[in-house]
Image (tube, rainbow, N blue to C red):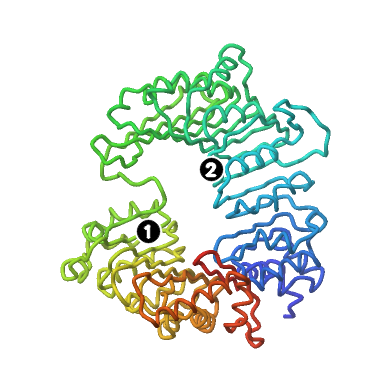
Amino acid sequence: MPFEQLPDELLLIICSYLSSFHIIKAFNDLNYRLNCTINQYRQNIDLRGLNLRQFYFFCKMIRSSFGNKVNSIILSNAAPSVRQLTLFRKQIEPFIQLLPNLQRLTLIDYYDDELDLFLPLISILKNLKELKITFVKNKNESTLCSLITQMLTDNFIYFDHIPKRRKRDVSILEKLIFTGTGYLKLTPIYNETITHLTLEIENTDDLFEIFTGFDRLQYLNVNMKELTVLTSNLYDILYKERKIQCLSLLDFRFQAKWQPEVLSFNQFLSILNSLPNLQHLSCTLKSEVTQDKLANSDYIKKERWRNLFAEFHYLIDLTCLIKCSLKSSNYSEIDFVRIAANASHASNLPVDIQLCYNNDITSNIKSDLTLELDIQDLHRMTGSQLASKLLRSHELTLYSDFFVDDDKVLSTFPKSLTLPDHLIFSQIRSLDLLGEFPSMNNIFLVTFVEQLICRSPNLQSIGFFLYWVENMTDLVLNFLRPLKNYLKQIKKCYLYTEGDIDEKFVSELAHLIPSLTLLSVKIDWYCNTAEVVNLCLMHMKHLIHLEMVLEDIPDYLDEDYIDRIKMEKEIEGVAMARDTREWLKRNTILGKRSSNRIFRAEKNGNDLKIWL
């Protein structure tokens, strides 16, 4: 059968096995029918994880082929990607003319020095309906807060804090999601377009700035630093004048720290009274008081929640999770009580309120997504105990604070620690080994990691943060060799150890982890930086991002030959700081025509980063 006669369904099945880059590279503009078939890949572009050549190719296609058809774009600064946000703005210019129909824009790991690249576009992108930004390295919260407030205020301008209405082109931005900003202190806002908002704010006063400032808000998700009593001026408005109401809000979700002895249940209820048409409520309240002190609080009385439910005529479901510390515990957080309520307006049955207490010390699991386990504690666990922790975790760190007895701990693998066959830990993304591991090629460690990788299909990162043992690079290879058949899914490796980064190590590491796209490695002071770069580029064929931490020469070394090395390192550092890319072209294979490499590079302090 000729290729042209293949049905669209079969072509789409083929596309499902390819990356968006390879789909566009292979099929774009071959003919009208194929353009229609792959239209979803031309309209919705995800640039995460591309190497530099692939990134430039997509930018070229947007400029020359299908920019006017693009509906959504995802850009990321997260490794192993290049700093895409800055590079994309330089490549796509004029932005408005090349992407006139852009409706959804997602920016991941957005740096504070890039604020002026995209935020000014919001008011002039006529079709933009959804903006999602995840911030990192935020250094100036006041500047960020000011810019965000200006962006949110779509038809008001402020002179001396007095709102003045002004006429301008109508914005249609409907969904706005900001995470990683830090807790923002909001100034008065007025917005007539946004219906969905996710934000991090300081306290209850900022929450009411949102209630009063958004005319069409239907969905609100906020992370508050603390749920507090209102300040006196807002208190007077709320209780005396009854002016604060957000009539449009239907779905309200928030999490916050709170002090139940300061914010009474009645005051909590008064905050919710500003939302008379609320249909869905979900909240997580975190307290520093211990469980026994919270036991008599109104917050865990079923009748109070039933009365709350009755006051809101449109409320369909309510979920509240209260977190506090167990009494006599070491302040580790635990889910104390879950309050769940559902109402069916089609029936006359009373509202069902369920209070589920969690008083079992064995279920004391950290609320964050990182699970840290001492190697000896792990040895004493059962497979079921470990599985309950792994199911809720994204990152696993195994650490050892001192030399353990190999014969007792690491020479055998207890059958009781075998994980249940039916469990898959799809949340696990990374595994790190931290501390002192005098021996890594042992039955216990290798067997445990083997069964973890087999049950963790999304585990793509492994890190070694090891110290106090010389030649740790050899121990890392000894650890990885028995796991060779299970390491093809690993794409990121972090090596912060003592030892030689030489050709033997790099070539075998590339053989053991063949799919490596990111390598972050500490380079000892006596290693030649250019040689290490060349070795990584020659042996790691899929490498997209190389990050090197260049160790300073210790001050206690004062021999004559050390002075010569210090001088060479200082000259090297100055040259790299002046023009990192030029230094790499002169001293590594990146400068050879035969390599045909497109790359970007930067050096900040002791960190050298190369994107390929």
SS label for mark 2? loop
Location of residue 201 by image quarter: top right
Q: Residue furthest bottom?
A: 594
**Left or right side of 326 for 30:** right
> Is residue 100 placed above or below 223 in the rendered structure?
below
Residue under label 2: 182
Q: Amino acid at mark 2?
A: Gly
Residue at (50% x, 74% y) in the render: 570
Q: Amino acid at mark 1?
A: Leu
Q: Are marks 2 and 1 in contact (CB under 8 Å)?
A: no
Other-residue count near label 2 (Cα within 10 Å), few / some / many at <14 / 14–19 / ≥20: many
Other-residue count near label 1 (Cα within 10 Å), few / some / many at <14 / 14–19 / ≥20: many
Residue under label 1: 396
Residue 88 percent location from the top left of the image? 70, 61
Instruction: Tell me the quadrant of the picture where the N terminus can be found.
Output: bottom right
Location of residue 404 by image quarter: bottom left
Residue at (23% x, 36% y) in the render: 328
Residue 348 percent location from the top left of the image? 50, 21
Q: Nearer the viewer, residue 266 or 389?
A: 266
Residue 87 percent location from the top left of the image? 68, 63
